[in-house]
Structure formats: structure tokens, C-alpha cells
Amino acid sequence: LADAHGYLGIIHGLAGDYDECLKSIERACRLSPYDSGRAMWLTGKAIGAFVAGRYDDVIATASELMREYPAYATAYRQRAAALAVLGRMEEACADMATLLRLLPGLTISQVRIRVPVKEPEAMERWLDALRKAGLPE
């Protein structure tokens, strides 16, 4: 049940347990490397890395997503936030422009509702990074 491991990894990531997130998602990807849920699993890995403050891991995972799924908007959102935190604003703004081209009208308030990051501090850190990258309220 690769999907079960993938979604368990997403839950661990949203809850701030990045080590367990990695274990579950890596297992899911080993069990089913070409699974249609892979993009979602990797998205969970990226948000888990962000919550853990592992911004280089966010960038690496989001970049992998972009190579495999170039129109997968969430990857641009994840990478833009990590780049903004690291002060790489030109790259962050470029990713945000792509995100808003793929999802016109996306806002901070929509992201707050759609992505249930459990730790309030981590959620606000993420939303602040998205603001810096240019996502409107």
C-alpha cells in the first residue's frame, strides 16, 4: 500500500515530524516509483522540510517535482517560499510568477485554508515567505 505510506508521510510532514515524513515517503516511492500519487507525496515531503527549517531540502524536492511534473503548481509555491526565506528573491519571485500563471487568483488566505500545517509558528513562517515572494493576501 504505497499510497498509505505516502499519505502517512504527508501527515508527518504537516505535523512537523520530518524524519518520519522522510521514512514514509521514501518507502512509498520505493514500493511504487511511478505511482500517480508521487507528486502529492513529494509535496508532503517539501512542506515537511519547510516546517523543519530544511530549506535546501525544500528546494531540492520542489525542483525534482518541477522536472517530473512541469505544470504542477504546488512545486512552485513550495520552492518560492524556501527561496524567499533564504533571501534568493529573484528566483523566489520568478517561481511565484509561474505559480500565479498556473493558478491565477491564488491568495494567502486560500493557502491558509488548503494546507493544514499543524504548528501555528510554521504556518505563519511559510505564509510570510509566500508574501515575500509576492503571493497576494
Image (cartoon, helix red, strand yellow):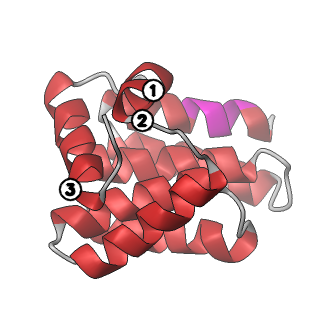
Q: CA distance from mark 3 to mark 2?
A: 13 Å
Residue in view at x 69 percent, y 53 percent: 39
The residue range painted magenta reads: 4-8
Residue in view at x 77 percent, y 41 percent: 2
**Residue 53 image-quadrant placement:** bottom left
Q: Are marks 2 and 1 in contact (CB under 8 Å)?
A: yes
Q: CA distance from mark 1 to mark 3?
A: 16 Å
Residue in view at x 17 percent, y 71 percent: 86
The three-letter amino acid code for the residue at tag 2 is: Thr
**Which dot marks residue 107?**
2
The picture places residue 34, in percent across and down from the top left corner, at 86, 60
N-term mark: 1 or 3: 1
Location of the C terminus (image quadrant): top left
Name the residue that disc number 3 marks.
132
The three-letter amino acid code for the residue at tag 3 is: Lys
Instruction: Answer few, some or many: residues within 10 Å of disc 3's Cα (few below 14, many 20 plus, some between 14 and 19).
Output: many
Is 4 on the left or on the right of 88, as rendered?
right
